[in-house]
Image (tube, rainbow, N blue to C red):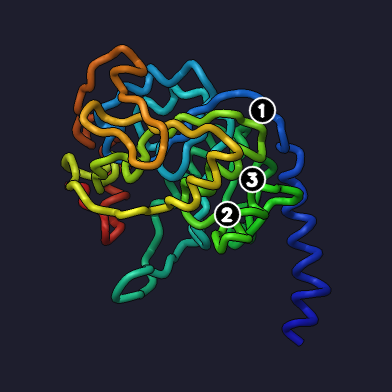
Amino acid sequence: MKSYVKHYFLKPLFYLILKRNNKFNNKYYGQEAYLFGDGTSIKYFDLKYFSDKLSIPISYTHFHKNAGLLNICFSIINEPFYFYPYFKLPFPPYTYWKNDIQKLYRRFRRLKPDVPFFTNISNLPVFLGKQNYFLFDDLINSEFTKELKQNGLKPFDGSVRTGIVLAHYFGFRKLYLVGFDYTHNPSVALHFYEKGKGQVVELGDHNLLFFQIAKRYIDCITITTNNSQSKYLDSISYTEFTKAELNYQENYEIVDSDILYTLNSWPDYKIY
């Protein structure tokens, strides 16, 4: 019975839902964009220097006080079941956690209803909207995702994969990665909305195979702090790129206090 439902009901339904994404194929053909992550390097960067190109924020970039300076063409948060009122913790004690953070994102959607937004298809029942689009495990007629899957990689496993795969599908020829600190060497672990400067971590060859494949489809350059480079991506320092000096700001200087209070409800964040 399960296989019958999956084959004759779910697969055709998913296809119709995912087919909506096709209208974005090559919409931004030949253009460049900034892909924004949540790394602590954002604390050193002035976002006004990233307003000259289109921007693709992933995860919580919208919570930055100066996110309004960015020319956002679409947004992504691809966490499964993220927009449900309760979220199962992916670490011990694996209990259900009351998810008030998703309410912050819904507030952004009300402020920017015309910005296309992409999320995991599991969120569809609780996150309907004219400009909300959904992802599953592939894109229709994408050679990039086909090669990734042939190499045992899931195209939408993690924020950076999702962002790069979608950007390529939408026609961008070059991405500047901002706030993806695990592409830096040395790598620093922390989010810009958490307190402190983070700690240097050894991640080995994290996402190495993905980036090796991705570079055959789209140019990726990671923007680093001035004392780091990248082991497996082309890189440029913030100062070299912007002609401006680094200027560290603590989380409470770049994120509103009510947002920090809500983010603090996540057990794994160090906000204060």
Q: Measured along the vertical axis of the image, is residue 118 above or below residue 124?
A: above
Residue 132's disc is 3
Report if the CB atoms under discs 3 and 2 are less than 8 Å apart: no
* Mark found first going from the N terminus, 3 or 2: 3
Provide the secondary structure element on which disc 1 rests: loop
Question: Disc 2 residue type?
Answer: Pro
Q: Amino acid at mark 1?
A: Tyr
Image position of 14 (left or right of 33)? right
Q: Which residue is mark 2?
A: 155
Query: Which residue does the image show at 80% across and 71% down from the upper left?
Result: 9
Q: Quadrant of residue 184?
A: top left
Number of residues whose C-alpha sits closer than 10 Å to that of mark 2, classed few (under 14), some (14–19) or many (20 or more): many
Answer with mark 2 or mark 1, whichever residue precedes in sequence: 1
Q: Tell me where residue 219 appears, x and y as whole percent.
A: 53, 32
- Which circle, 2 or 1, is nearer the viewer? 2
Mark 1 highlights which residue? 28
Q: Nearer the viewer, residue 250 or 161?
A: 161
Which quadrant of the figure contains the N terminus?
bottom right
Amino acid at circle 3? Asn
For numbered disc 3, what is the local secondary structure? strand
Q: Residue at x 27, y 39 (%)?
A: 40
Residue 175 location in percent, x, y?
51, 31
Q: Which residue is nearer to you in this view: 61 or 244?
A: 244
Mark 3 neighbour density, 10 Å: few (under 14) some (14–19) many (20 or more): some
